Amino acid sequence: MLILDITMPVLDGFEVLKHFNKVGIRQNVIILSSYDDIKIVQEMLSLGCNGYITKNNAGEHIVDAIKAVANGEQYFSSDIQNILVKTFAGQHVPIGDAPDKFLKETLTDRELDVLKLISKQHNSPEIADKLNLGLSTVETHRKNLLRKLKVKNSVGLAVYAVKNKIV
């Protein structure tokens, strides 16, 4: 059994599970993370993790998680269970915490194009002209970027783009 964090030096939890899948390693894995975003939980499940516990609930769940996964079961801390149930029931689940690297991977190619131009100080009409888009489409992309990247304005978008080597 292996307990992984999502953000680790050298290889992160995503990369470890991808490597295991690539080389055919079958290992019981529990993710212990500070991130509670449903997309991350779903990604880790698709990569083969057997359990997911958030660090704010680790003390009360870790022993039970190890026992359950050792017995071939899946295990999720109560906060992750609630998120999974709401998602399964079709209820809106607010975006949780996620590492910057993962947030970048959720952006569409067009959103990345818009982000690059925002980072180069282009306004929405200029972006619409450069990308042959309608102004309302650019504004929708801009709003989606603000929401997905959890920043408040264009400066936050530009800082994110530089920090994550998008520009």
Image (spheres, grey):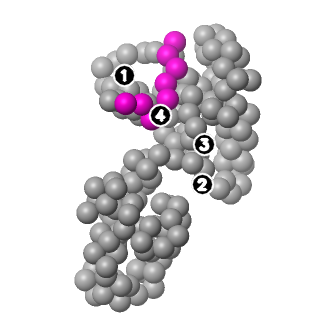
Residue toward you, 162 or 132: 162
Would you name the residue on which mark 4 appears? 6
Mark toward the start of the polypeptide (2 vs 3): 3
Residue at image point 43% right, 50% down: 100
User: Which marked residue is nearer to the observer: mark 4 or mark 2?
Assistant: 4
Q: Is residue 6 magenta?
A: yes
Mark pair 4, 3: CA separation: 11 Å
For residue 95, side relative to residue 59 (left or right): left
User: Residue 74, percent across and down?
Assistant: 63, 23
Q: Looking at the image, do the residues carrying marks 4 and 3 touch, with CB atoms under 8 Å apart?
A: no
Dot label at residue 20: 1
Residue picked out by circle 3:
36
Stretch in magenta? 1-9
Please give the count of numbered marks on the rendered protein: 4
Looking at the picture, which amino acid does disc 4 mark? Ile
At mark 2, the secondary structure is loop
Q: In the image, residue 89 lies at what x, y percent?
A: 72, 48
Tag 1 or tag 4, which sits nearer the N-term? 4
* Residue 5 in sight in this render: yes
Q: Is residue 118 above or below residue 135?
A: above
Q: Is residue 31 within the magenta segment? A: no
* Label 3 or label 1, whichever comes before in sequence order: 1
Q: Which amino acid type is marked by label 1?
A: Phe
Q: Amino acid at mark 2?
A: Ile
Q: Residues within 10 Å of mark 3 (few under 14, many from 20)?
A: some
